[in-house]
Image (cartoon, helix red, strand yellow):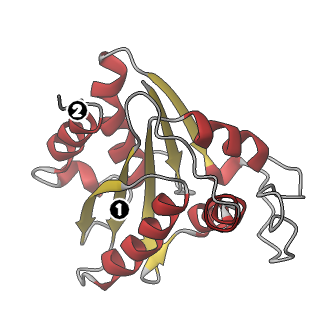
């Protein structure tokens, strides 16, 4: 099974990074192929809403998204990990999602969704936020749902932790690491 993970936090060894690494442990232990993109270090131009992808479902701009487009097509499972900033996903995550407009055109205008493959396609959203209000989760979830459906991920789970702000504070949460590990296990479980 091919697993694709997007690390959407600019903070190395921060809460989002720690949570994602814990989620990937059981997946790696089970021998699945993992491809991890640290979005903060990538050269991704913002979507220009130019219409260049309307007719072919391909973005006309060439940058690191080309690598991401190919990885999304091949993935059986996709994990999106992001801190919550101002009630939403990080800019690093959102810039990548916005560039998936090419997939939207391909799926909805050209009627060519990404095939589900041998294992089907599933997703997982990991969120960490400093505030305690759920609105940040709700707003981030809405964006992630649109992203996952656009790239032909019909179902995804969400694991979120609020009130976790300082770098490394996720390590003090009583269940976060166990929950993340279990979420990774569940993501690659095939139901017969």
Q: Which residue is mark 1?
A: 127
Q: Residue drawn 33% across and 73% down?
A: 130
Tell me how many marks there are. 2
Q: Quadrant of residue 122?
A: top left
Q: State which mark lies toward you, 2 or 1.
A: 2
Label 2, secondary structure: give it: helix
Which quadrant holds the C terminus? Answer: top left
Relative height, residue 149 to residue 163 (above, below): above
Within-10-Å neighbours for mark 1: few <14, some 14–19, many 20+: many
Rendering coords of residue 102 (x, y %): 72, 61
Which quadrant holds the N terminus? Answer: top left
Q: Residue drawn 42% across and 82% down?
A: 87
Rendering coords of residue 149 (x, y %): 47, 61
Q: Residue drawn 80% across and 77% down?
A: 49
Horizontal relation, residue 78 to residue 55: left or right: left
Horizontal relation, residue 137 to residue 117: left or right: left
Q: Nearer the viewer, residue 56 or 180?
A: 56
Q: Quadrant of residue 187?
A: top left
Rendering coords of residue 138 (x, y %): 32, 79
Q: Which mark is residue 185?
A: 2
Q: Which mark is residue 61?
A: none
Horizontal relation, residue 75 to residue 52: left or right: left
Label 1, secondary structure: give it: strand
Rendering coords of residue 118 (x, y %): 42, 27
Within-10-Å neighbours for mark 2: few <14, some 14–19, many 20+: some
Q: Which of the two labelled residues, at mark 2 and mark 1, occupies the earlier sequence position?
A: 1
């Amino acid at each position: 099974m091919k697993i694709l993970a997007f690390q959407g936090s600019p903070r190395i060894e921060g809460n989002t990074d720690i949570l994602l690494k814990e989620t990937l442990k059981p997946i790696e232990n089970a021998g699945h192929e993992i491809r991890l993109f640290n979005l903060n270090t990538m050269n991704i131009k913002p979507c220009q809403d130019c219409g260049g992808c309307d007719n072919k479902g391909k973005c006309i701009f060439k940058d690191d998204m080309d690598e991401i487009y190919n990885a999304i097509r091949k993935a059986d499972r996709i994990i999106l990990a992001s801190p919550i900033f101002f009630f939403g996903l990080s800019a690093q995550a959102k810039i990548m999602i916005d560039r998936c407009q090419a997939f939207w055109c391909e799926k909805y205008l050209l009627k060519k969704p990404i095939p589900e493959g041998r294992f089907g396609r599933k997703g997982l959203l990991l969120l960490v936020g400093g505030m305690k209000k759920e609105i940040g989760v709700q707003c981030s979830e809405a964006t992630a749902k649109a992203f996952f459906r656009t790239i032909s991920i019909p179902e995804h789970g969400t694991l979120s932790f609020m009130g976790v702000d300082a770098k490394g504070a996720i390590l003090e949460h009583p269940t976060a690491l166990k929950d993340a590990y279990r979420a990774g296990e569940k993501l690659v479980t095939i139901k017969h």
